[in-house]
């Protein structure tokens, strides 16, 4: 998706929370995908809100675009990431809708509201006697693409037509 904004994209920073065990797996998948596109990945650790500014500043200094993966969807962190990235003129890609509302450029990820609805059906089944080990593991089926047009304008980026067509929502 970032390549749609910048076809010559060659470097992306990935903001990771080292306290999240999934970070290692996320970094592995991102690095594998990026290598097929000829994009260099720079891992940036930010275990605390205070570390976010340092990680974003370092990424900007190294000429990277920004993608981030946080363990919790905390609006304050989304706002902090967005503000810091805009200050350093970095575009951001997130998994969370709240981060785009806060000012990140775009998000593509699991529909969290749908995830919570599905979790509620599992809880209902368990409370009604189903054994958790007998319930199938489900994968997300609804993914949302959101784009923040204000952020694109602030970064001097034109939103590619192909992304507008695919977007579930363009935030004005």
Image (cartoon, rainbow, N blue to C red):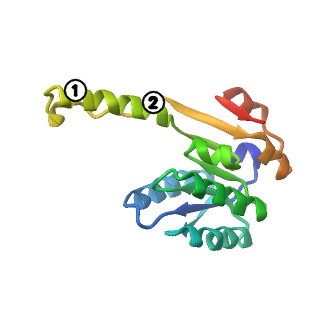
Q: Kindly identify the residue that appears in the image at 36 percent across and 29 percent down.
A: 118
Q: Kindly identify the residue that appears in the image at 72 percent across and 54 percent down.
A: 91
Say whether residue 138 is visible.
Answer: yes
Q: Kindly identify the residue that appears in the image at 24 percent across and 31 percent down.
A: 136
Q: Quadrant of residue 134?
A: top left
- The residue carrying pointer 1 sits among few (fewer than 14), some (14 to 19) or many (20 or more) residues within 10 Å by Cα, namely some
Q: Secondary structure at mark 2?
A: helix
Q: Nearer the viewer, residue 47 or 124?
A: 124
Q: Is residue 35 above or below residue 151?
A: below
Q: Which residue is mark 2?
A: 114
Image coords of residue 100 (percent x, y): 66, 45
Q: Is residue 44 above or below residue 86?
A: below
Q: Which residue is mark 1?
A: 125
Q: Is residue 169 above or below residue 88?
A: above
Q: Secondary structure at mark 1?
A: helix
Image coords of residue 22 (percent x, y): 39, 56
What count of labels does the image hold?
A: 2
Say left or right for 56 vs 127.
Answer: right
Q: Quadrant of residue 35?
A: bottom right
Say whether residue 167 is visible.
Answer: no
- The residue carrying pointer 2 sits among few (fewer than 14), some (14 to 19) or many (20 or more) residues within 10 Å by Cα, namely some
Say left or right for 126 vs 54.
Answer: left
Say left or right for 96 vs 161.
Answer: left
Image coords of residue 142 (percent x, y): 49, 29
Is tag 2's residue or tag 1's residue first in the polypeptide sequence? Answer: 2
Quarter of the image with the C terminus in it: top right
Q: Nearer the viewer, residue 147 or 161?
A: 147
Q: Kindly identify the residue that appears in the image at 57 percent across and 60 percent down.
A: 14
Quarter of the image with the N terminus in it: top right
């Amino acid at each position: 998706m970032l390549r749609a904004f910048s076809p010559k994209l060659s470097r992306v920073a990935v903001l990771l929370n080292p306290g999240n065990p999934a970070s290692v797996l996320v970094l592995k998948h991102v690095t594998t995908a990026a290598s097929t596109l000829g994009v260099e990945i720079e891992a940036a650790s930010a275990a605390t809100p205070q570390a976010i500014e340092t990680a974003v500043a370092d990424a900007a200094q190294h000429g990277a675009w920004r993608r981030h993966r946080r363990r919790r969807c905390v609006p304050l962190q989304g706002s902090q990431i967005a503000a810091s990235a805009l200050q350093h003129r970095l575009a951001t890609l997130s998994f969370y809708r709240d981060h785009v509302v806060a000012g990140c450029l775009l998000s593509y990820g699991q529909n969290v509201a749908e995830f919570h609805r599905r979790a509620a059906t599992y809880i209902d089944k368990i409370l009604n006697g189903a054994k958790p080990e007998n319930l199938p593991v489900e994968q997300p089926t609804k993914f949302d693409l959101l784009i923040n047009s204000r952020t694109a304008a602030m970064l001097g980026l034109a939103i590619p037509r192909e992304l507008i067509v695919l977007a579930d929502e363009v935030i004005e």
